[in-house]
Amino acid sequence: MEILIFLLIVLFGLRLSGVLGATRFTGWPTCAAYALAAMLVLTGTTHFLPDSLASGPAPTHGDLLPMVPPFVPFPSFMVYLTGVLELLGALGLVLTGIRRPAGIGLAALFVTLLPANIHAAVSDIPFNGAPASPLWIRIPEQVLYIAVALWAAGLYSRSRAELVDVARQR
């Protein structure tokens, strides 16, 4: 839940900076791209944290291992791989030319990570010393991340002219 709060704070903070004159952040999809990128840098780096940092506030590689469902081969490698994909996705979101494919790729990644979240909730796997999040929280949160990735990719944005055309057709 803390990660979701972080995402929302960054999103609204960037949009506020757009209102205050930062021209890069005048559109919600761009703010969503940068906010999701910030969140992914935060979460992606935890995939590489050694267990010697386990007493810190962030989860470590070892904390993420039990989340990997038993049917997934090479769990340690998969934790590293998903960390790399999250960091590459974050980079793609801030590079305007590849934002769309990065957002779509991240949405696909979030869908593939859904079984790990379900496994962690159903198996009651604690996370970073805290009790497991219930499934009714994990699933909607993951769906929200998928939606934000697609929003950042520009799949939900329509120009005002397109919206006027849609309104006229009704």
Image (spheres, rainbow, N blue to C red):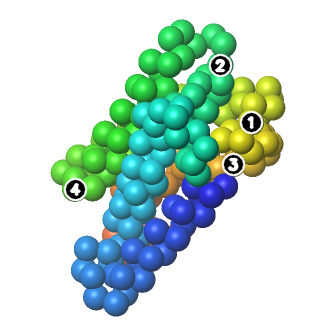
Q: Position of residue 152 (x, y in %)?
A: 39, 56
Q: Position of residue 125 (x, y in %)?
A: 75, 31
Q: Earlier in the sequence, mark 1 or mark 2?
A: 2
**The quadrant where residue 164 appears:** bottom left
- The residue that mark 3 highlights is 140
* Amino acid at circle 1: Pro
Check contact, mark 3 vs mark 2: CB within 8 A.
Answer: no
Q: Decide: few, some or many residues near mark 1? Use Cα within 10 Å; few <14, some 14-19, many ≥20.
A: some
- The residue that mark 2 highlights is 69
Asked if residue 150 shows in the view, the reply is: no
* Amino acid at circle 3: Pro
Q: Earlier in the sequence, mark 3 or mark 4?
A: 4
Disc 3 to disc 1, how far (Cα)? 19 Å
Q: Nearer the viewer, residue 76 or 84?
A: 76
Q: Earlier in the sequence, mark 3 or mark 1?
A: 1
Q: Earlier in the sequence, mark 4 or mark 2?
A: 2
**Name of the residue lying farthest toward the left:** 97
Badge nearest the viewer, 3 or 1 = 1
- The residue that mark 1 highlights is 126
Disc 4 to disc 2, how far (Cα)? 35 Å
Disc 1 to disc 4, how far (Cα)? 37 Å
**Where 31 falls versus 81 (above or below)?**
below
Residue positioned 74% across, 36% down in the render: 126
* Amino acid at circle 2: Pro
Q: Nearer the viewer, residue 79 or 4?
A: 79
Q: Position of residue 16 (x, y in %)?
A: 42, 83
**Where 59 falls versus 148 (above or below)?**
above
* Amino acid at circle 4: Thr
Disc 1 to disc 2, how far (Cα)? 14 Å
